[in-house]
Image (cartoon, helix red, strand yellow):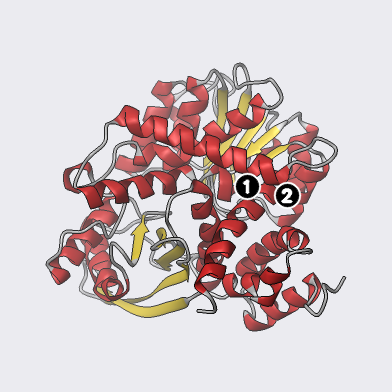
Amino acid sequence: MVLNDHVDLPTFMQGVSKRNPGQTEFIQAVQEVAVDIFDFMEDKERYHKEQILRRIAEPDRVISFRVCWEDDNGNVRVQRGWRVQNNNAIGPYKGGIRFHPSVTESVLKFLAFEQTFKNALTGLPMGGAKGGSNFNPKGKSDHEVMRFCQSFMTELYRHVGADVDVPAGDIGVGAREIGYMFGQYKRITNQFTGVLTGKGLEYGGSLIRTEATGYGAVYFLANMLKTKNDDLVGKVAVISGSGNVATHAAEKVAMLGGKVVTMSDSAGFIHDPDGMTQEKIDWIKQLKNVRRGRISEYVNEFKGATYHEGMRPWGVPCDVALPCATQNELLGDDARELIKNGCIAVSEGANMPTNLEGVHVFKDAKILFAPGKAANAGGVAVSGLEMSQNSGRISWKADQLQQLLVDIMDGIHGSCVEYGQTKGGYCDYVRGANIAGFKKVADAMLAFGVV
């Protein structure tokens, strides 16, 4: 269908593909949003006239730079770094930094595009960005990681600032890496500002930031179940990943009465039919954050658990699922398997972990499905609160932050329901999140004129 004198959806996506050849992750992310936005914009002429979606799908800038560093043997190593600043219509650019061999410009553009809508959903004044490098911190010494982070920030510092762009952590970037980058920024600029979030509590970090993404995904899941007069008590949960998001999602599921039976890493997953107690979850945190070991070691510690090499946990029967590892880890066949095994709700802790086919399988089955831009927004929400604390030179207590996180996730859920409710009574949370996030950013862009 052609909308007045404007392009239709297939033509729009042809243009996106032509302008971004080979960038499959980015094109997938735009397609997933555009399907809902074109329908929403049908009778809203000004969005078409001002080319709002086209402008959001074209990053403000993509910065690419070389990162040189020396390993412990004195060998010169060369990596590539990026910062994608997608849109700052509602606030300074905000989004994580990812260190992983899979990082490409396409991946970071998709993440920055998604981040724009996610940040808008929080209700906080934050634009969308993402950055990173194809550097792999696994197997590197602390000194090697430090030298890389310092070299990375020596270039990145030119493009970030407390009122310009505020990066955070992501895959491969935890407290250690944030500390090294913040130290280098302070060294170069001679300024102590809130230029990064996810900092240590000793130098401006926020309480509950580590827990926020995982906790938030579970709060959103609980909100979805509440619309069906249900809760997590007695529910069996499968979770992928074993980093901060996954372990804290598992922790909160257990707190709310659910039973977590799986976790994973890139090599495979563990299945513990007895369920993961707080003691077991704390052991995994120690394994991953301190010892930097593999999830397979779990079965040597806890009897009754099994390890499944090279597999993902989506074939394990469950009531609810939380993909918390990485993008496109849950495919169409996985989605069908989950539904066949009785899964009634999915809440994405990672960014775009379900591919387009899987999303459509969940929506066609009309199960409760929360996309990452809504469900995992708790992390960036608390990052936004860290920015506020840094600006005011104050520090809020954990219970205050916990309540703010609950309130923000409630607000995001409400926005998704407002724009996602269908005539048949089913709530399409994907549509709701896309439209609610788009509308806030689009209306701000309209107010600025053509810039």
- Give the alpha-carbon distance from disc 1 to disc 2, as whole Å: 9 Å
Q: Which quadrant holds residue 283?
A: top left
349 horizontally vs 131: left or right: right
**Horizontal and vertical percent position of residue 345:** 68, 33
- Quick check: can you spot residue 390? yes
In this view, 141 is above or below 396: below
Image quarter where the N terminus lies is bottom right
Residue nearest the observer in this picture, 106 or 114: 114
- From the viewer's perspective, tell me whether residue 160 is left or right of residue 16: left
Residue marked by disc 1: 371
For label 1, the crowd category at 10 Å Cα-Cα, with few meaning under 14, some 14 to 19 and many 20 or more, is many
Left or right: residue 78 versus residue 223 is left
Q: Which residue is rendered at x = 23% and y = 46% of the image?
A: 200
Identity of the residue drawn at 43% across and 68% down: 134
Quadrant in the picture for residue 336: top right
* Side of 11 where 369 appears, left or right: left
Name the element at disc 1.
Answer: loop
| Residue type, mark 1 in image | Pro
Q: Is there CB contact under 8 Å for labels 1 and 2? A: yes
Q: Residue 13 location in percent, x, y?
A: 73, 73
Disc on res. 359 = 2
- Amino acid residing under circle 2: Val
